Amino acid sequence: MSLSTMTLPTTAGGASWRAADHPPDLRPEVWRTTLETVYDGWAATGRPMPGFDARLLQRRAGPVTVVDCICDPCAGSRRRPGPARDGRELVVIQLVLGGREQFSIGEARIALGPGDVLVWTTTRPMSFEVTERLHKRSVVLPLARLRHWLPGSWQGATGRMAAGTAGAALVSGAVGAMAGGLLEQNLPDGEALGEAMLGVLVAGLGAEAPRRAGGLRAAQLDRVKALIDARLDDPDLDPAGIAAAAGISLRHLHALFGSAGTTVRRHLITARLDRCRRDLANPVMAGRTITDIAFSWGFQNAGHFGRRFRDAYGLSPQAFRQGKKEDEGRM
């Protein structure tokens, strides 16, 4: 059996895997396949250390999946946001029982340790690095159910609940009890379990709200900026389109940028000008006209672009490009 077609040994309602069952030289590749199979869409990055050891236990009950994972230092990423193999988008509630992990969700960097709870969804690019032998338990649920509970604010559920806070205490207790029950196969009603877990999560988020408000706003703003960056070449991109893509109201979008001391349109223009400046400074782009570069980043009028560029950088686009060319010649 090839590694690419390996499946986890199945048990009633789930599957299990142990690195110790495989020769040491095969463990990195088997781990890569196992990570993709169990966590759906994640890919291992780098190569685990010699003697790498890990164990995974997975159980399912209706729409709920529980994964118990113990692993040595390793890393992975989920670069392409999107649904799982069965077509569902997912929300994952992860409790760290021991060890250390660095987690990234979009632009946010999150350090995790014992007692921390992390909530993430398959709608964002993510990566992780286990820095100290890790033990974690995760409850996986359909994201559609979280959207039902929090129709206008489900995006704000993602992030860390720090150990010792009221929210983390509430959610970690529920994750521990549910995961333990499912792993022991004595909690068969997955529909009820899923709704109960989401109810506890929403209550925990409410307890965290005062502490998370600033961090949540910053995380939302980072996410919106990433959406803008991905569509800077679209000349029709405007605040209404940005708000729709981010799944938030236009009013909330303006409030996010207002809290950062700017406006949506000002940020959009500044980001486009920065891309144009980079291209004008790049010798590889020497064969492209200034107008072509400006239009490729969403500007629609050469004169307007020139005025905006001069206001931002104190030089016309032509003078800026010529100055960079002369600097290259002197090097």
Image: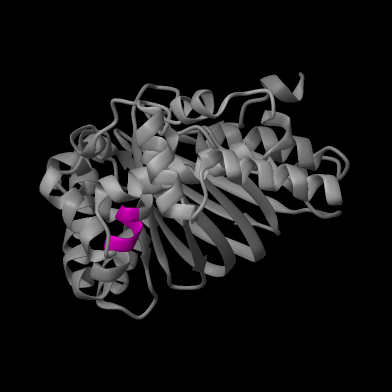
Which residue is more in the foreground, 25 or 261? 261
Image quarter for residue 255?
A: bottom left
Residue 142 position (above or below residue 100):
above
Q: Position of residue 291 (x, y in %)?
A: 49, 26
Image quarter for residue 230?
A: top left
Is 98 one of the magenta-colored residues?
A: no
Residue 114 position (above or below residue 289):
below
Which residue is more in the foreground, 24 or 203? 203
Left or right, 19 with respect to 171, comes to right
State the colouring used for the structure image: one colour
Residue 156 position (above or below residue 283):
below
**Image point (68%, 19%), residue name:** 5
Q: What range is drawn magenta here?
A: 217-221
Q: Position of residue 62 (x, y in %)?
A: 29, 33
**Image point (72%, 31%), residue name:** 284
Q: Position of residue 197 (x, y in %)?
A: 24, 52
**Image point (40%, 52%), residue name:** 311
Image quarter for residue 212?
A: bottom left
Which residue is more in the foreground, 169 or 188? 169
Residue 103 visible in the displayed image: yes
Which residue is more in the foreground, 236 or 88? 236
Residue 124 visible in the displayed image: no
Is 220 one of the magenta-colored residues?
A: yes
Q: Is the magenta region chiefly helix, strand or loop?
A: helix
**Image point (76%, 46%), residue name:** 326
Q: Position of residue 257 (x, y in %)?
A: 25, 56
State which quarter of the image contains the N terminus.
top right
